[in-house]
Image (tube, rainbow, N blue to C red):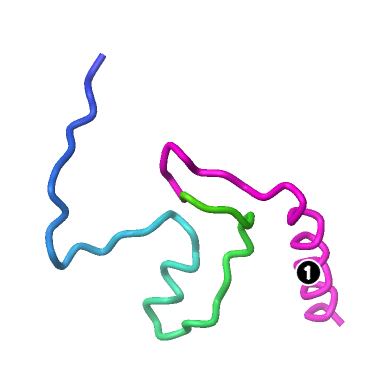
Amino acid sequence: MSTLEVRDVPELAAIGGASDGNFTCGTGCPALDGFGAIGGGAHADHEHVIVTEMAPRTRLLAALVEEHVR
């Protein structure tokens, strides 16, 4: 089993998750939202979601999709 090696991040490194938002943001579309869960500590040991925000967030996404397909 290998161990995780911590390395310095080069000054000009591009960092982020695997969201499509990372690709579209690079095209100059800063207002795109990935509609992920509301919380904090993304990709860290203390990552968390605010459970009470999941239903409102889902309703928002559903309303936007419904508006788009009309």
State the residue at coordinates (74%, 62%): 57
- The residue identified by callout 1 is 60
State the residue at coordinates (83%, 73%): 63
Name the image quarter holding the N terminus: top left
State the residue at coordinates (30%, 60%): 15
Mark 1 closeness class: few <14, some 14–19, many ≥20 residues within 10 Å? few
- Residue 68 in the magenta stretch? The answer is yes
Nearest the camera: 21 or 6? 6
Residue 54: x %, y % from top left? 75, 53
Name the image quarter holding the C terminus: bottom right
Q: Quadrant of residue 13?
A: bottom left
24 shown above or below 9: below
Q: Magenta residues: mostly which secondary structure?
A: helix
Residue 41: x %, y % from top left? 46, 49
Residue 18: x %, y % from top left? 44, 54
Highlighted magenta segment, given as a residue range: 42-70
- Residue 6 in the magenta stretch? The answer is no
Q: How many marks?
A: 1
State the residue at coordinates (41%, 85%): 28
56 shown above or below 65: above
